[in-house]
Structures are given as C-alpha cells and as structure tokens.
C-alpha cells in the first residue's frame, strides 16, 4: 500500500479541496482557530495536523503524504484483523486486497482527511476485538475520540460495533465497558458537532442519493474491479465469507451499517458522499479473503478425503500450519482451549478435524504461567512429526503454497486494472487542476490586469499558486482570507464593485466552468453583481477550461452611439420695422 501510494504522488497540480488544505495548513494556529469559528470546523484537527506537516516542507508531496501513511496503516490493520479473527493467510489476503482496491489508492493520494479516518476506524475495530478478549477499553475509546475529531461522520461506526457486540452475545459487563469508552469519545465530539451544525450550508451542494449512487458505491466497495469476472467472483466470495463466524460479525456490520445509515438519512437531508464512509471499505476485503479461505478449506478437505487421510492426521496438519501464529494464538491452538476438541497427542487421533486457530476462538486462554510448558509441548510435538518424516510436513508446505497462490491470484486483478491505476495518478482525473489554470494565467495576464473570481471560492487558485497572479488587480477583494478568518477572503460591497468595474474595458475571470452564461442566481450580492455586469456589458474573447474551472478574458462591448441629427438653424431675428 505504501508503494502504491507513493507511485505518482506528485501529479503536478492540486484540485479545489486539496488547495483548501494547503492554504489553511500554511496559516498560523491563531488564524486557523479564527477560521474554524466560521467554516470547516469539521476538519479542524486535520488542519492543525497539516499545519505541522507543511511547516516542515510546503509542497504537494508533503500535502498528500499523511494520507499515504494512513492508507498503509489501514492495510496493515485490515491484515491484523484477518489474522486475529481467522488465520494468517486470511489476514495477508485481506490486506493485499485492500491495498489494490482502486478506491483506496484514490483517497491515499488526496490531501484530505479521509484515509486517516479509515485508519482510525480500522484501529478502533482491532482494539474492539482485543477488548472483547479481556484487554482494556480505554485505548479503544481514545482512538475513537481522535477519529471522530478528524471527521464526525466516523461516529456511524458505533452502530456497526454495537451490532458486533450483539452478535457476540456479550455479557452486561462488556456492554458497560464499551459504553464508558463510547461515552468518552462521543463527549469529545459533541462540541464539534454543535459548531459544525451551524456550518451545514457547506454541504448544501450535496444531492439526494439515488439508486445509481448506491450501485456505484457497491461496485467501488465490493471488488477490486467494478465490472467483469473479477467483480462477480468477489461478490461470490463475499457471500461465502458470510459463514466465517467471528470475522463475519465484525466485517459485515462495518461494511454495511455506516453506508446504509448515511444513505437513509440523506433521503431526508442530503449528506452522503462516498468519501464520508470510506472507512467502511475495510469490511469487504476481509469477507472476500474469508470466502476464499473457505473455498480452499473445502477443496483441501475433499482432496484429503480422497487420499484417505484420517481426521487425526488432518488435525495434526492444522497444527503444523499454526506454526506461524503469534505466541498467544499458538498456545490456544496447542492447548486445545477452544469450543471444539483438540488433538489427542497421546493417540494421535480421535479429535475433531476442526481446530479454531484464532485466539478469538479461545474464550479462556491459558494463564501466562502456562505459556512456557505449552510452547515446549508444541515444539516437542513438531520435532517428533518432522523426525518421523510423516506426510504432515508436506501438508503444511502445501498450505503455505496455497497462501502464496492466493497472493499471486491477487495480482491478476491488479495487473488487469493497471491502466486505470495509472490514469488515476493524472491530475486531469481530479475535478480540476488549479496548477494548470495558474500556469495559463501566468502566460496570459499582463501586469495590472483586473481579475474577478466567480464565485469567490475560486480565489483559492491564486492562494494555492500565487506566483502567476502577482501584479494582477483583484477587483472584488476587500480583505484577505487569513485576516478575515475565511477561506477566500472578504469582498467589497456591490456598489463599490460596480464602481470598480465601470473603469475597466477588459477583465479576466476565474470562474466555475458552467457559469457565464448561466441561469444560476448567486446568493451573495457581490457575486450577483459580477455575473450581471460581466454577462451584460462584456463579451468573451478567450477561454481556457480545466475541469470545473475556467480562465476567460472578457472585453467590454462598445456602447451604442446616439444618432447624430443635423443642427436646426436658428430662426432669424425679425428686422426692425422702418419708421
């Protein structure tokens, strides 16, 4: 994941949201605090983090590097969940599948908080599993609190975790510990939620999600490729993975509950975007890997049955495969402290062929004092099998080959989608490329040329790449964004802007590409003056479009000349009458 994230990280241009991160991150801490009182409070902690990062080196690579690290951490945490809830190869496969999912790679290269939020949710989910094994709840609550402050929509994961606890039928004391940890995390979120609710106009551009939105999210989440054989194979493996016990009780709610809740709420108040529930993606590769493991288990069982291998021998082979487990999980497997019977090491048989190799399947793990004896028993047992040259070692080797085969199989969809991965690293694949717009401005603008930004948000173009706009006159700007506590500055009033426009014959416009001409009526009166005057009194001479933003030159139309009439001769004054 780290390699894929670093590949093409410097794509040569920021888009709108990234430029906001860049310009806010380069402000001072008091200026950031001033901004958060009026806008973007939901991203406040992330902006403070980026302030520290950009203070080291302000650039596009540094801007996106935290997201790359967040995606890499999430891939590792997904793998750790697979190991703890199933077995090592399930964790390995799940981590690799998460890493090569295109949606993961896309947000790993975004200078926004969503990859870090995904890492926080994955970490909290792993800590939830550990707490269910008897560990403390406070690390879980602390990670949740930080994650919620990175983005408040991560709070939806609490519903998924509650469903996991309900499926596990935990005791009342467990619910109490979980509730205390959740109370601390939600308490940290409440002030942010109160402030951000007053800033809800920022998401007024969102629309009610329809069936196409839901289908697109499902295709992005459920498979490495959104169409074709790979997609339907992934869907089939997810269905098979639903029978994976503890893993299903963790992965399925994580995958379904946050997106479904946000989609449902958005039918009444539009709040949905796929990036707000990116963290739910972690559930899909876990289920795919678990389904693949069940297929391998079924094939292996049929092969051993055909070879006439006894149940006891199969169980011994499972123990050999368990040789790569962590100490806690090895102890659980060798001691037989599980819901099913273990191997009878005295007779070498008579045991169930199912050995739950995961520590989470051991509700009462042995006390620390018994670790050395159990590990010594395991080593002696393994030496005996190897010295005896039984087929068990061969079976374990084949199990490792199966793991390797799964790793190689994961490269097939990645290689198939390699052109798509490459194109996603092109700046043209983002909504706009502000670096390209600024470069055009540097070639076309002359010193002293007047410039308008319509709407005023697109002033972030000049804030992110100020060089080409040095010397230009920003006709509408009254106070800079840093001083006014806004993203793009505070503009002058409509009357003053009309007076400034009256004295120019040409003006450059940095505008949203679907404006001018447009039926859009801006809510801001200064923006209405820009649209009315430019559309009514100027004519477009040049235009350059880069995604959602364009640079255009407008020249004032010649005013209509009044019709010249021939002068009317004055009537001659009457001559005096002679006496």
Image (tube, rainbow, N blue to C red):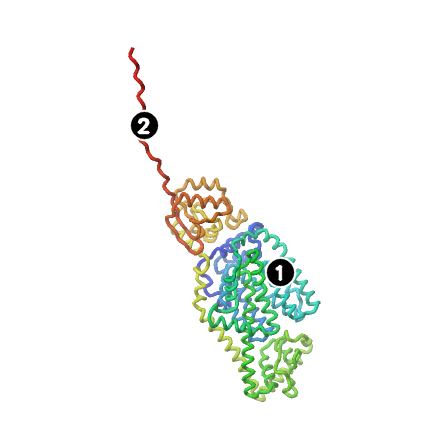
Q: Is residue 209 rendered to the left or right of residue 350?
A: left
Residue 478 higher or lower than 137, as above or below: above
User: Of circles 2 and 1, which is in front?
Assistant: 2
Tell me, yes or no, whether the two marked residues, 2 and 1, touch with CB atoms within 8 Å: no
Q: Secondary structure at mark 1?
A: helix
Q: Which residue is mark 1?
A: 145
268 and 480: which is toward the camera: 268
Q: Position of residue 340 (x, y in %)?
A: 65, 80
Residue 284 higher or lower than 402, as above or below: above
Q: Position of residue 65 (x, y in %)?
A: 51, 62
Q: Residue furthest right?
A: 173
Q: Position of residue 218 (x, y in %)?
A: 52, 66
Q: Is residue 185 rendered to the left or right of residue 304?
A: right
**Quadrant of the image containing the C terminus:** top left
130 and 193: which is toward the camera: 193
Residue located 46% across and 65% down the image: 7
The total of numbered circles placed on residues is 2
Residue 92 higher or lower than 523, as above or below: below
Give how far apart the Cα atoms at labels 2 and 1 are.
87 Å
Residue located 54% across and 47% down the image: 484
Q: Secondary structure at mark 2?
A: loop
Q: Which residue is mark 2?
A: 568
Q: Residues within 10 Å of mark 2 (few under 14, many from 20)?
A: few
Q: Position of residue 342 (x, y in %)?
A: 65, 82
């Amino acid at each position: 994941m780290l390699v894929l994230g670093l590949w093409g990280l410097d794509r040569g241009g920021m888009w709108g949201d990234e430029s906001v991160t860049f310009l806010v991150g380069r402000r001072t801490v008091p200026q950031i605090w001033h901004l958060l009182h009026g806008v973007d409070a939901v991203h406040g902690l992330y902006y403070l983090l980026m302030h520290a990062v950009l203070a080291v080196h302000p650039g596009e690579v540094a801007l996106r590097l935290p997201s790359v690290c967040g995606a890499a951490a999430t891939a590792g945490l997904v793998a750790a969940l697979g190991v703890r809830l199933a077995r090592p190869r399930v964790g390995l496969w799940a981590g690799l599948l998460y890493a090569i999912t295109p949606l993961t790679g896309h947000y790993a290269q975004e200078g926004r908080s969503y990859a870090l939020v995904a890492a926080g949710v994955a970490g909290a989910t792993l800590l939830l599993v550990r707490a269910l094994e008897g560990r403390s709840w406070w690390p879980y609550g602390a990670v949740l609190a930080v994650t919620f402050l990175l983005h408040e929509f991560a709070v939806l994961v609490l519903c998924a975790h509650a469903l996991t606890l309900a499926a596990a039928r935990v005791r009342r004391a467990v619910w109490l510990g979980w509730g205390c940890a959740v109370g601390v995390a939600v308490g940290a979120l409440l002030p942010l939620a109160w402030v951000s609710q007053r800033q809800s106009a920022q998401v007024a551009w969102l629309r009610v999600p329809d069936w196409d939105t839901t289908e697109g999210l499902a295709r992005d989440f459920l498979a490495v490729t959104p169409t074709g054989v790979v997609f339907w194979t992934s869907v089939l493996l997810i269905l098979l993975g639903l029978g994976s016990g503890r893993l299903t009780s963790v992965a399925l709610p994580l995958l379904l509950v946050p997106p479904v809740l946000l989609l449902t709420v958005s039918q009444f108040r539009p709040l949905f975007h796929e990036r707000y529930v990116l963290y739910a993606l972690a559930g899909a590769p876990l289920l795919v890997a678990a389904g693949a493991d069940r297929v391998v288990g079924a094939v292996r069982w049929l092969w051993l049955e055909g070879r006439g291998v006894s149940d006891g021998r199969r169980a011994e082979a499972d123990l050999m495969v368990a040789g790569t487990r962590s100490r806690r999980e090895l102890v659980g497997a060798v001691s037989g402290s599980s819901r099913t019977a273990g191997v009878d090491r005295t007779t070498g048989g008579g045991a169930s062929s199912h050995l739950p190799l995961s520590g989470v399947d051991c509700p009462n793990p042995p006390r620390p004092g018994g670790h050395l004896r159990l590990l010594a028993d395991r080593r002696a047992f393994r030496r005996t099998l190897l010295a005896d040259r039984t087929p068990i070692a061969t079976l374990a080797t084949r199990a490792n080959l199966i793991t390797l085969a799964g790793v190689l199989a994961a490269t097939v969809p990645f290689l198939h989608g390699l052109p798509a991965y490459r194109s996603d690293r092109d700046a043209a694949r983002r909504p706009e490329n502000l670096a390209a717009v600024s470069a055009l401005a540097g070639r076309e603008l002359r010193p002293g040329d007047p410039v308008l930004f319509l709407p005023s948000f697109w002033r972030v173009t000049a804030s992110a790449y100020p060089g080409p706009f040095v010397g230009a006159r920003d006709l509408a700007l009254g106070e800079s964004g840093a001083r006014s506590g806004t993203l793009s500055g505070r503009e002058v009033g409509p009357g003053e802007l009309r007076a400034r426009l009256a004295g120019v014959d040409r003006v450059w416009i940095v505008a949203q590409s679907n404006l001018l001409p447009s039926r859009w009526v801006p809510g801001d009166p200064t923006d209405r003056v820009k649209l009315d005057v430019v559309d009514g009194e100027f004519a477009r001479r040049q235009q350059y479009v880069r995604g959602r933003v364009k640079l255009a030159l407008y020249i004032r139309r010649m005013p209509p000349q009044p019709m010249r009439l021939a002068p009317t001769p004055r009537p001659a004054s009457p001559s005096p009458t002679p006496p």
